[in-house]
Image (spheres, grey):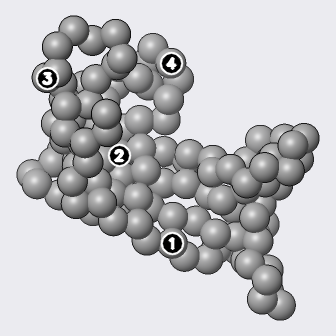
């Protein structure tokens, strides 16, 4: 069961050539239909409640703020619409575990109740 609080999503456009540099070759950008054909990027912020792996015993888990930064794309092989996760800012000192163990782009950030958009920098 997913238990989220304060769910917010903000989506904006970005220059296609800049956004494309973040995608693997298998993915193509999902572009806007306006004449400038911009990429769609979003930040999804929420508070995890009881975040834990499926194998974790019991119902308790990590509770913290999280912001996922992502780009909308299309899988060239299947034509499916997908999102490519650029990074996750997580307000927990344990955010390094998914980064180290599974190569997930998680960045632990200090959290005093909220996370701002400048919590991490994408290169």
Give the label on residue 60, or none. 3
Decide: is 57 above or below 29. Answer: above
User: Residue 105 placed where, x, y %?
Assistant: 49, 35
* Disc 1 packing (10 Å; few <14; some 14–19; many ≥20): some
Sequence-earlier tag: 4 or 2: 2
Which residue is under mark 4?
102
Secondary structure beneath label 3: loop
Which residue is under mark 2?
89
Sequence-earlier tag: 1 or 3: 1
| Mark 2 to mark 3 CA distance (whole Å) | 21 Å
On the image, which quarter does residue 100 sit in? Answer: top left
* Disc 2 packing (10 Å; few <14; some 14–19; many ≥20): many
| Mark 3 to mark 4 CA distance (whole Å) | 22 Å
Give the label, 2 or 3, closer to the camera. Answer: 3
**Frontmost residue, 111 versus 66:** 66
Sequence-earlier tag: 2 or 3: 3
């Amino acid at each position: 069961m997913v238990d989220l609080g304060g769910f917010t999503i903000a989506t904006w456009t970005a220059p296609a050539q800049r956004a494309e540099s973040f995608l693997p070759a298998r993915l193509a950008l999902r572009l806007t239909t306006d004449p400038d054909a911009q990429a769609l990027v979003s930040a999804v912020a929420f508070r995890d409640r009881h975040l834990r792996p499926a194998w974790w015993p019991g119902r308790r888990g990590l509770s913290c703020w999280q912001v996922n930064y992502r780009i909308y794309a299309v899988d060239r092989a299947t034509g499916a619409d997908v999102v490519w996760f650029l990074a996750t800012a997580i307000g927990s000192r344990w955010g390094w575990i998914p980064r180290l163990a599974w190569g997930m782009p998680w960045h632990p950030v200090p959290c005093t109740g909220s996370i701002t958009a400048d919590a991490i920098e994408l290169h």
